[in-house]
Image (cartoon, rainbow, N blue to C red):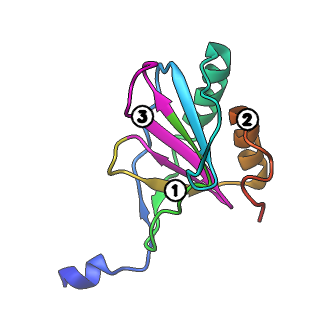
Amino acid sequence: MLLAASCSSADSAAPAFRPVGQVERIVVTMNFGRDTLPPITDSARIRSITAFVDAHADGWMIPWAGVPVARVNAGFYRGASDRGAVHYFGANTGAFVASSRPDDFASQRATDADIAEFLRLVGSPADAVPAR
């Protein structure tokens, strides 16, 4: 019976993500992590990006087929020399992907307009994530 329950084809709800909080640096990767944009350190721009991410704290799911990999991903760092991000938030076609710990990746549906806004905020080209 346990095996049958673990093989369900339904997505499972994930808890809401905690707010990003105070960060000093955001590192954005594109093309599934192959390309890196210059680090974002401007405090006003960081506040805009974290406000966008925090506004999407609810509605996360863990898809039964697995969480998609982000084409464009933002890593949020507390300090300039920190090696490990405290939060990740990214986009793929039709979805946002996030993690606030190494083992809690989840996704949520996203409109093309929301994805375009995220790409604009992080300075990624508009075509880095194909529209649906």
Q: Where does residue 69 sit, x and y in percent of width and height? A: 53, 59
Percent across and percent down for residue 109 are 62, 58
On the rendered structure, is 50 left or right of 15?
right
Please report the bounds of the magenta region as a residue range.
76-100
Quarter in which the C terminus is drawn: bottom right
Residue 3 or residue 86, whichever sits in front: 86
Looking at marks 3 and 1 on the same chain, the residue that comes earlier in the sequence is marked by 3
- Farthest top residue in view: 43
Q: Is the residue 12 above or below the residue 17 in the image?
A: below
Disc 1 crowd, CA 10 A, few/some/many (<14, 14-19, 20+): many
Q: Considering depth in this image, is 43 or 20 the residue closer to the camera?
A: 43
- In which quadrant of the rendered view does residue 9 lie? bottom left
The secondary structure type at the circle numbered 1 is strand
Q: Is residue 93 above or below residue 86?
A: below
Q: Is residue 98 magenta?
A: yes
Disc number for residue 123 = 2
Residue at image location 67% in from the left, 15% down from the top? 44
Q: Secondary structure at mark 2?
A: loop
Marks 1/2 in contact by CB < 8 Å: the verdict is no
Disc 1 marks which amino acid?
A: Ser
Q: How far, Cα to Cα, is label 3 from label 1?
A: 18 Å
Q: Nearer the viewer, mark 1 or mark 2?
A: 2
Q: Residue at x 71, y 48 (%)?
A: 115
**Which label was assigned to residue 107?**
1
How would you rate the neighbour count of disc 3 (Cα within 10 Å): few for under 14, some for 14-19, many for 20 or more? many
Residue 131 sits inside the magenta stretch: no
* Labels 1 and 2: the sequence-earlier one: 1
Q: Secondary structure at mark 3?
A: loop
Q: CA distance from mark 2 to mark 3?
A: 19 Å
The residue under label 3 is: 85
Residue 49's x, y, as percent? 63, 29
